[in-house]
Amino acid sequence: MRQPAFWSLALAEITDPDFTHVAIGVLPAHATADPAAWARALLSRDALPRWIAGLLYLHGIALRAAGRSARCDRFRLGRVEGDEALISLDGRRLDLRVGVGVDEDRALVRVVTAGRIKGGRAWSWPVRSVLPILVRRMIDRSRRDLSGVTR
């Protein structure tokens, strides 16, 4: 039996994170074990809580009103290695890496987040406090979507 070990592409990309978070969910019985599919499901607008999607929508409107383009592709699926896919965001104030791994043998889905705050750290408290709630809800929604279970 192999011994449990912990590593993530997110921690390989940001070796000195200002914050980290790990969430684990149960892989539904008939869901795919493809980490890229799980990463895409986590990134979908449907997986976001409505209040976060609303804030992102309003942010896009504000950017367009200021004459700046609102990029819809801020999060991008990076590489996939083994049982983990990497999601990257390089922003003006935040660099974020999210490793989405699927352990089919143990029927687990793990989401490892590593972030680096650039500039002022005053707004890092809201990011750190909301992140666990946000990731948990996104995993739960993705579990429902990928398992084919209807609400």
Image (cartoon, helix red, strand yellow):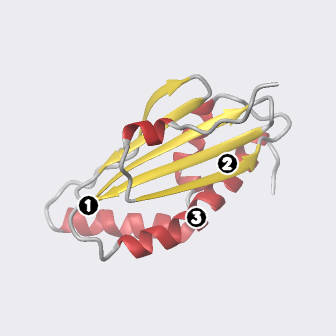
Q: Mark 1 sits on what residue? A: 93
Q: Marks 2/1: CA distance?
A: 27 Å
Amino acid tagged 2: Ser
Does 10 sit above or below residue 133?
above
**Residue 117 at x, y = what percent?**
31, 60
Q: Secondary structure at mark 2?
A: helix
x 21%, y 54%: residue = 69
Which quadrant of the figure contains the C terminus? bottom right
Quadrant of the rendered image containing residue 2 = top right
Does 125 sit above or below residue 32?
below
* Between 40 and 33, the one nearer to me in the picture: 33
User: Seen in the image, is 56 located left or right of residue 147?
Assistant: left
Residue contact at pointers 3 and 1, CB within 8 angstroms: no
x 77%, y 35%: residue = 31
**Residue 39 at x, y = what percent?**
56, 39
Q: Secondary structure at mark 3?
A: helix
Q: Marks 3/2: CA distance?
A: 15 Å
Question: Quick one: label 1, few (<14), some, or many (20+) residues within 10 Å?
Answer: some
Q: Which mark is residue 132?
A: 3
Q: Mark 2 sits on what residue? A: 142
x 37%, y 59%: residue = 18
Numbered circles on residues, count? 3
Q: Secondary structure at mark 1?
A: loop
**Residue 27 at x, y = what percent?**
77, 41
Q: Which mark is residue 126?
A: none
Does 78 sit above or below residue 56?
above
Q: Marks 3/1: CA distance?
A: 20 Å
